[in-house]
Image: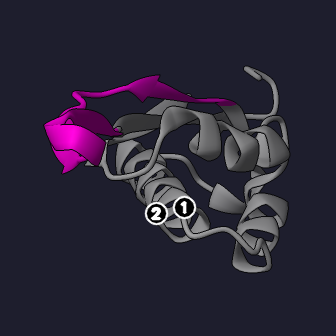
């Protein structure tokens, strides 16, 4: 049985989020939680919340032992980009792109993963 959790509109670029997600892909959920607790990245807190939500969704679906779950898939898709303007020399302007991402984590039992 598998369950997933999605966190949308996270104010971090997908490229930075994928660095953290690559560290937990395929791991046991307990090991993944430990990895995220000690990862020195700002997005790791958001990824940990999403992982805990996916585990709670799995227990709600009827998984007997949530410690046996593994991270089947995790990815960060690109969300909408907030566009801002920064003044530059001689009256010109430069565009600032504040990127957002949608983080998805899918957990499953060992047999399905």
Main secondary structure of the magenta stretch: strand
Q: Residue at horizontal 28%, vertical 35%?
A: 94
Check the image and name the residue furthest to the bottom.
Answer: 38
Q: Residue at horizontal 83%, vertical 47%?
A: 23
Report if residue 88 lies within the magenta region.
Answer: yes
Query: In the rendering, at what x and y percent does residue 53 appear?
Result: 41, 57
Residue 96 visible in the current orientation: yes
Quadrant in which the N terminus is drawn = top right
Q: Is mark 1 on a helix, strand or loop?
A: loop
Residue 33 occupies quadrant: bottom right
Instruction: In the rendered structure, find residue 61 and report the number of the disc placed on it.
Output: none
Asked if residue 27 lies left or right of residue 42, the reply is right
Quadrant in which the C terminus is drawn = top right
Q: Is residue 103 above or below residue 79?
A: below
In contact (CB < 8 Å): disc 2 and disc 1: yes
Residue picked out by circle 1: 43
Q: Distance between the residues labelled 2 and 1?
A: 5 Å
Residue 19 occupies quadrant: top right
Q: Residue at horizontal 53%, vertical 71%?
A: 45
Numbered circles on residues, count: 2
Residue picked out by circle 2: 46
Check the image and name the residue furthest to the front.
Answer: 90
Residue 96 occupies quadrant: top left
Image depth: mark 2 or mark 1 in front: 1
Q: In this view, does 48 lie above or below 100?
A: below
Residue 105 visible in the current orientation: no
Query: In the rendering, at what x and y percent does residue 85 appear?
Result: 17, 42
Asked if residue 78 lies left or right of residue 88, the reply is right
Q: Nearer the viewer, residue 60 or 28?
A: 28
Q: What range is drawn magenta here?
A: 73-98
């Amino acid at each position: 049985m598998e369950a997933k959790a999605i966190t949308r509109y996270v104010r971090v670029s997908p490229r930075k989020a994928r660095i953290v997600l690559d560290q937990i892909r395929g791991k046991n959920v307990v090991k993944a939680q430990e990895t995220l607790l000690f990862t020195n990245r700002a997005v790791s807190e958001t990824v940990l919340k999403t992982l805990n939500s996916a585990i709670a969704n799995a227990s709600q679906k009827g998984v007997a032992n949530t410690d046996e779950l593994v991270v089947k898939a995790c990815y960060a898709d690109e969300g909408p980009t907030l566009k801002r303007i920064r003044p530059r020399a001689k009256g010109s302007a430069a565009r600032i792109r504040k990127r957002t991402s949608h983080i998805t984590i899918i957990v499953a039992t060992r047999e399905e993963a």
